[in-house]
Amino acid sequence: MLQESLRPWMWVLGVVVVLLAGMLYYDHWSRCSGKPYERADALRNATSFLQSLSRDFSLGDPPPSLVEEQYDSARATWMFTFRNATCTLDIITDRCKGTEVGGMTKGCTGRRAH
């Protein structure tokens, strides 16, 4: 009797799982198979990420500024290097994997007091 009352819920759960998996696949496919970021979009993402990072880390004063950029066409990835007198950091961004820190010197790893 308990199995019979659970059977409709198993179908609902199965449909929800399939729909969720389909949505995740479509999201990944639409981001990763499209054209790569243009320089302006990639730089906007990297700069926004740098500003967000500056809330949690002491990056020095004045804030690091852009000193170098590289585009890897094989990976469709942009890398931007920001630097000031105490801190150098690389920010990597692409449409598929998002934006992340690629490297950071010791001068910019100190946590800020909140």
Image: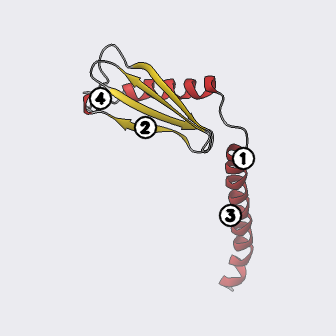
The numbered mark, 3 or 1, whose residue comes first in the sequence reads 3
C-alpha distance separating marks 3 and 1? 24 Å
For disc 4, the neighbor class at 10 Å (few under 14, some 14 to 19, many from 20) is: some
The numbered mark, 2 or 4, whose residue comes first in the sequence reads 2
Give the residue drawn at x 46%, y 24%.
68
Q: Is residue 30 above or below residue 51?
A: below
On residue 17, the disc is 3
C-alpha distance separating marks 1 and 2? 23 Å
Q: Are marks 4 and 3 in contact (CB under 8 Å)?
A: no
Amino acid type for the residue under numbered disc 3: Val
**In this figure, which residue is indicated by the disc labeled 1?**
33
**In this figure, which residue is indicated by the disc labeled 4?**
108
Q: Are marks 2 and 4 in contact (CB under 8 Å)?
A: no
Q: Quadrant of residue 31?
A: top right
Q: Position of residue 22 (x, y in %)?
A: 73, 57
Q: Is residue 7 above or below residue 104?
A: below
The numbered mark, 1 or 2, whose residue comes first in the sequence reads 1
Label 2: element kind:
strand
Q: Position of residue 78 (x, y in %)?
A: 55, 34
The numbered mark, 4 or 1, whose residue comes first in the sequence reads 1
Q: Position of residue 15 (x, y in %)?
A: 74, 65
Q: Are marks 4 and 1 in contact (CB under 8 Å)?
A: no
**In this figure, which residue is indicated by the disc labeled 2?**
101
Toward the top, the furthest residue is 62
Give the residue drawn at x 68%, y 64%.
17
Amino acid type for the residue under numbered disc 2: Val
Q: Quadrant of residue 19?
A: bottom right
